[in-house]
């Protein structure tokens, strides 16, 4: 059994390579080895260079994906409210609206912040994105806590949780219609 070494330092047998679609083993070319000697990247890959048109297309697709996700969440919010209202009455419909809104409102503000950054040509860094996600989750928890303390007399818990879960799973609607960004 022969062994080959891939570009990332993984050693695999020729039998493993054959079981992955009968591809020949990967070897570095003379050009890649010469490039390493001249100071090129050791993995043989070069960075992707995007034109301004490519960047504009990516910004457009990212913005459209954010708007689609928000639209799917609105559709799921309406679905949860209508189903809860039809099944258990007005209090259940209002509870579903509160549960769905507790997640949708912070999420909409976060998406708006990301859209503004995209349009201003200043996309969010990973750290900014993480902080935004944390703020969004804290706001959702605070809104749920506030709802429980203000309206606990008539709040219908199953409907509240149904509304919350429906909005959280809004991307499932995008998957059903193959519109996931």
Image (tube, rainbow, N blue to C red):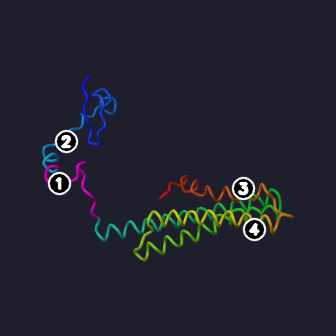
Which residue is located at x 53 percent, y 65 percent? 131
Residue 59 location in percent, x, y?
41, 68
Which of these two is toward me, 18 or 43?
43
What is the crowding at mark 1: few (fewer than 14 residues within 10 Å), some, or many (at least 20)?
A: few
**Which of the two discs, 3 and 4, labels the residue nearer the N terminus?**
4
Q: Residues within 10 Å of mark 2 (few under 14, many from 20)?
A: few
Counting from the top left corner in percent of width and height, residue 98 is at 73, 65
Q: Nearer the viewer, residue 136 or 156?
A: 136
Q: Report, in whole angstroms, how far the alpha carbon at label 1 lies from the one at label 4.
A: 59 Å
Local crowd size for mark 3, using a 10 Å CA cut-off: few (<14), some (14–19), many (≥20): many
Whether 92 is among the magenta residues is no
Position of 113 relative to 140 (above/below): below
Q: Nearer the viewer, mark 2 or mark 3?
A: 2
* Residue 159, position as x, y percentages in the image: 76, 57
Distance from Cα at disc 4 to Cα at disc 2: 61 Å
Pointer 2 residue: 28
Q: Earlier in the sequence, mark 4 or mark 2?
A: 2
The residue labelled by disc 4 is 146
- Residue occupying the far right of the picture: 153
Quadrant assignment for the N terminus = top left
Relative vertical location of residue 157 with respect to residue 136 in this rendering, above or below: above
If you read the primary sequence from the N terminus, does the residue marked by circle 1 or circle 4 appear first? 1
Q: Quadrant of residue 118?
A: bottom left
């Amino acid at each position: 059994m022969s062994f080959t070494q891939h570009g990332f330092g993984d050693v695999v047998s020729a039998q493993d390579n054959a079981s992955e679609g009968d591809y020949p083993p990967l070897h570095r070319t003379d050009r890649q080895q010469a490039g390493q000697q001249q100071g090129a990247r050791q993995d043989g890959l070069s960075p992707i260079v995007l034109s301004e048109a490519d960047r504009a297309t990516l910004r457009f697709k990212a913005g459209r994906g954010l708007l689609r996700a928000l639209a799917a969440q609105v559709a799921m919010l309406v679905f949860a409210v209508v189903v809860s209202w039809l099944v258990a009455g007005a209090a259940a419909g209002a509870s579903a609206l509160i549960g769905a809104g507790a997640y949708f409102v912070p999420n909409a503000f976060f998406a708006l912040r990301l859209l503004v950054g995209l349009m201003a040509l200043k996309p969010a860094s990973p750290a900014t994105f993480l902080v935004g996600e944390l703020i969004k989750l804290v706001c959702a928890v605070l809104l749920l806590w506030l709802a429980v303390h203000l309206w606990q007399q008539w709040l219908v818990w199953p409907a509240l949780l149904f509304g919350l879960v429906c909005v959280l799973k809004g991307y499932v609607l995008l998957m059903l219609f193959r519109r996931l960004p």
